[in-house]
Image: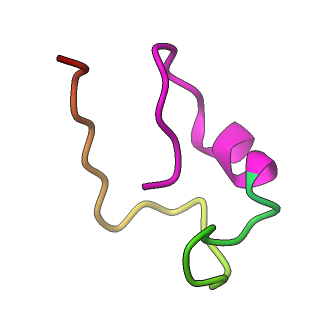
Amino acid sequence: MLYEGADIKPPDEILHLNDGKCPQCGKKLSLIPIDVEVIPLK
């Protein structure tokens, strides 16, 4: 998971928040989405 919150943020902003890396494994992230899942809050 890269972002969790009430407001939807654009991908470039989420990348900036994580310094362009996955917060779990440290791999470089791309702006080109391959598999994105959006789950509504319950």
Q: Residue at x 59, y 43 (%)?
A: 11
Q: Residue at x 59, y 32 (%)?
A: 10
Task: Say which quarter of the image contains residue 31.
Answer: bottom right
Where 35 sits versus 3, above or below?
A: below
Depth check: give the residue in front, 23 or 12: 23
Verify whether residue 37 appears in magenta. Answer: no
Which span is picked out in magenta?
A: 1-17
Q: Residue at x 25, y 48 (%)?
A: 37
Q: Quadrant of the N terminus?
A: bottom left
Query: In the shown orientation, is residue 19 left or right of residue 25?
Result: right
Query: In the shown orientation, is residue 29 left or right of residue 20?
Result: left
Verify whether residue 10 appears in magenta. Answer: yes
Task: Say which quarter of the image contains residue 39.
Answer: top left
Q: Position of residue 6 (x, y in %)?
A: 46, 14
Q: Position of residue 25 (x, y in %)?
A: 57, 84
Q: Quadrant of the C terminus?
A: top left
Query: In this figure, what is the number of numbered marks?
Result: 0
In this view, which residue lies farthest toward the left?
42
Query: In the shown orientation, is residue 33 left or right of residue 32?
Result: left
Depth check: give the residue in front, 2 or 36: 2
Where 30 sits versus 41, above or below?
A: below
Q: Residue at x 74, y 57 (%)?
A: 18
Where 2 sits versus 29, above or below?
A: above
Q: How is the image coloured?
A: rainbow
Q: Position of residue 33 (x, y in %)?
A: 42, 60
